[in-house]
Amino acid sequence: MVNHAIILAAGLGQRLRARSASKPLTQVHSLSLIEIGVRQLHAAGIAHIVVVTGHEADRVEAHIDALAHRLDLDLRCVRLEDWSRPNGWSVIAGAGAVDAPFVLVMADHMFGDGLLARLAGQSLDKCDVVLATDRVDNPLVDPDDATWAARDDQARITAIGKHIAPYDAVDCGAFLANAALPRAIESAIARGAAGSLSDGMQVLADARRAMTMDIAGAWWLDVDDPRALDLALDQAPDHLDCVRRAAVADGGGGGDVG
């Protein structure tokens, strides 16, 4: 049973800065992106959640502390001092504070109700990580920022990254993993890689230990820029119950940091 999760919330969020000084605190119908992520994980049965902070850490951590008290959740922060490093360093930091297996998500990703519960229910008996993937022609995906995956006929990842070719799936930013994932990132760094999450995923892919779960048309969104934030404001109430309730309560507004 999966009881632990990591949310990566350390990055600068440069592409969204025109609308928000802190991406995790960006409001979608009066809920911060980080609160939406926490609520989604809790709804998926996750009892213990660690948030890795970095940019605007004081503000984000204060928000998380208040959220933990208000929702009565085991919700803690781990601060990454050098948050300019690639996101794999955040995974390593967060993995040191959770038990495996764990669900791993990004603070700026939203997932339709039920998707994370389905991911948490996947088996790691024959692999070390399961990545949620979508079709490459999803119109909500920004092709200039997407991470792509190539798979074999058994849904194993053979290659992953922003600049691979060919590819047949897009990375949704949600993972079920065991302790081999942070070790794989550390291995990639030791070999000279910068330390992205994809670097570690490629190590596991090369060992045939990285699987995928096709999300089968489920809704998800990477809220990485103003266009995506507007899409979230428009579409998220149709796919996430917590956002739907917030949208009704606030009358449809809310797209910046409060």
Image: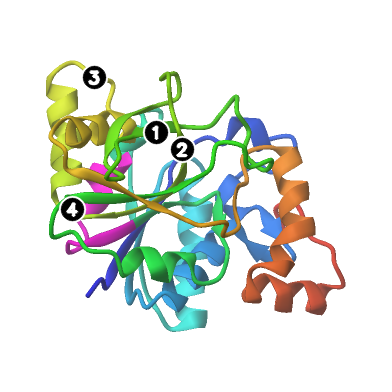
Contact? badges 1 and 2 (CB < 8 Å): yes
Name the element at disc 4: loop
Mark toward the start of the polypeptide (1 vs 3): 1
What is the x, y in percent for residue 172?
48, 46
Q: Label 1 belongs to which residue?
A: 149
- Which residue is painted at 12% across and 22% down in the image? 190
Q: Label 3 belongs to which residue?
A: 193
Mark toward the start of the polypeptide (3 vs 4): 4
- Which residue is painted at 76% across and 54% down in the image? 255
C-alpha distance separating marks 1 and 3: 19 Å
- Which residue is painted at 69% across and 58% down in the image? 27
What is the x, y in percent for residue 248?
81, 77
Mark toward the start of the polypeptide (1 vs 4): 4
Which callout, 1 or 4, points to the residue nearer the camera?
1
The span shown in magenta is 90-103
C-alpha distance separating marks 3 and 2: 23 Å
Whether residue 225 sits left or right of residue 44 in the image: it is: right
Q: In which quarter of the image is the N terminus?
A: bottom left
**Three-letter amino acid code at the position of disc 3:** Ala
C-alpha distance separating marks 2 and 4: 30 Å
Q: Is residue 213 above or below residue 251?
A: above
What is the x, y in percent for residue 132?
41, 51
Few, some or many C-alpha atoms within 10 Å of disc 4 (few <14, some 14-19, many ≥20)? Answer: few
Which callout, 1 or 3, points to the residue nearer the camera?
1
Mark toward the start of the polypeptide (3 vs 2): 2
Name the residue furthest bottom.
72
Q: Label 4 belongs to which residue?
A: 96
Which callout, 3 or 2, points to the residue nearer the camera?
2
Name the element at disc 3: loop
Circle on res. 194? none
Q: Nearer the viewer, residue 26 or 223?
A: 223
